[in-house]
Amino acid sequence: MGAYGTEGPKHAPGGRLHRRDARFQHGLTYRSGMPPPDLPLDLHPSDVPLLVGVSGGRDSVTLLHRLVAEGMAVEAAHVNYGLRGADSDADEAFVRDLCARLGVPLHVHRVPPSGAPAANRQAWARAVRYTFFGETAAARGLAAVAVAHHADDQAETVLLALQRSASLAAVAAMRPRRDLDRQRFPGIALVRPLLHVQRAEVHACAEARGWAWREDASNRDRRYVRAAVRHDLLPALECLAPGTTERLVHVAAVAARLVDHRRQATPTATDDRLPLGAWEGLGTDERNAVLAEALRRFLPNVDLRRSRVEALRVLTDAQPGRAVVWPDGTVWRERDALRFVAAPPASPSEATVVVQPRQTVAYGRRTFEAGDSLPMPADPGRDPHVAYVPLLAFPLAIRPWQPGERLSVLGASELPRISGLLTRAKVPPSERDGWPVVTSASGDPLWLPGVRIGRGCAVAVGEPCVRVVFSSESQTSTAYF
């Protein structure tokens, strides 16, 4: 159960912390009555203005207070997954109240609990969270997204990395600063201003200043591996060898420096493609380093495991058109390169986008611009990127096409499969799976944007319709209706 934190180390019933006094963890001591020093923030001038992710927990609340105390231009973002019922709503209410008192603009994303998968919910939640953060930062013109990971989180990440991979890149763990997602959110950084600070220091600072926070009991659920590492494995290692946390953090820093040095001496990918000639003359380890760096760079939400690097190495020897598919992205074997394609946003609101007249909506990296109602012109043209849609068909829905789905093509008697239309239009295999189809309010396919227009868009001259324009970063189609 969640509960409001109150001033100092006291907590409301049901929100018990079950912890030792944070002042005495990891050898940290402060004289009675003396507050700990302010936590130093690792930030660059280019990181501001920034968006800070605030769950309501102690770490993110402390980070928000410190950013505000430094007088930085900051906005906050909170995701309510709805998975804990009333407790999730109480977390949101707490964050709203906190930001109102601090004078910080807040952006909240509420996710229907029905959208959560039965398995791997933590990865799903992370994808939803960072997608929302990126979209909000981009819309608000913010330079960076700040999250409250600290040194103990880094130590846990190193242990988890060693569990699934022995690669140097995996052991490098979290970086204080990296691109959030170059493909979807270019120019926006992900920063961790507290990564050099231990958990005990963060907690002591919050308690000494009487800052309130929320407790999430699911963080102690040992069914999640990280929770078991945090509450069982790492404390046991500290008992056996005090200072283990600091040493693990140091190992991550050394690994990061070695990875960066090797990266500078190793050819890598540009844009979202890795030319197959990039590793000619390189040994196996260096080739794996190239693949691991490309994976980290272009699909940052995909866990960097040895098995995934091996899968990419096998893909380089496969026929063009083959792909390796993971929940957070796909890598395609093209004729002379590997192409990295991030998965569509995980938020359920992104799966289907609704558009009305006089609206412009985004669908991934594509946009649909719907105008006002107008009489159907005598010559609507033959551009498959522009459709004149009957006014009665609105509201339109934009969604990914489904396997086996067909489109009744305007001006033809055929009823071809959409997959075939995409192939004949020479849409690259790496783009086909996420290609949108526009349907009427009743769900009937009307238009395969950029490829073919359906019979459902047949409108008599002079009848009311709406002109809809489809824009894509890669308009590859040359098909006409």
Image: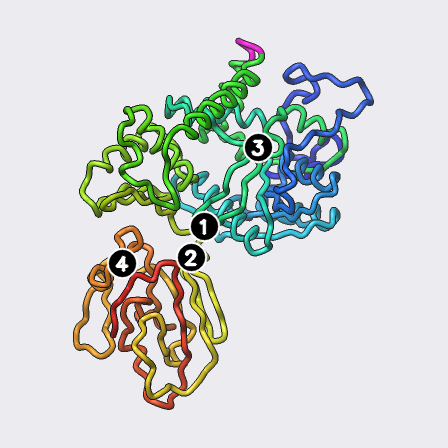
Sequence-earlier tag: 3 or 1: 3
Sequence-earlier tag: 2 or 1: 1
Sequence-earlier tag: 3 or 2: 3
Q: Label 1: which residue? A: 184
Q: Label 3: which residue? A: 149
Above or below — where is 480 with respect to 104? below
Sequence-earlier tag: 1 or 4: 1
Q: Nearer the viewer, residue 381 or 465?
A: 381
Judge the density around disc 3: few (<14), some (14-19), many (≥20) Cα neighbours within 10 Å: many
Q: Which residues are magenta?
A: 238-242
Give the label, 3 or 1, closer to the camera: 1
Q: Secondary structure at mark 1?
A: loop
Whole-Å distance between the Cαs marked 4 and 3?
A: 41 Å
Mark sitting on residue 427: 4
Q: Is residue 160 visible?
A: no
Marks 2 & 1, CB-CB < 8 Å contact? yes
Task: Single out the residue that lies furthest toward the top.
Answer: 240
Q: Residue 411, image x and y in percent?
A: 22, 79
Q: Nearer the viewer, residue 74 or 141?
A: 141
Q: Label 2: which residue? A: 365
Sequence-earlier tag: 4 or 2: 2
Q: Residue 243, image x and y in percent?
A: 58, 13
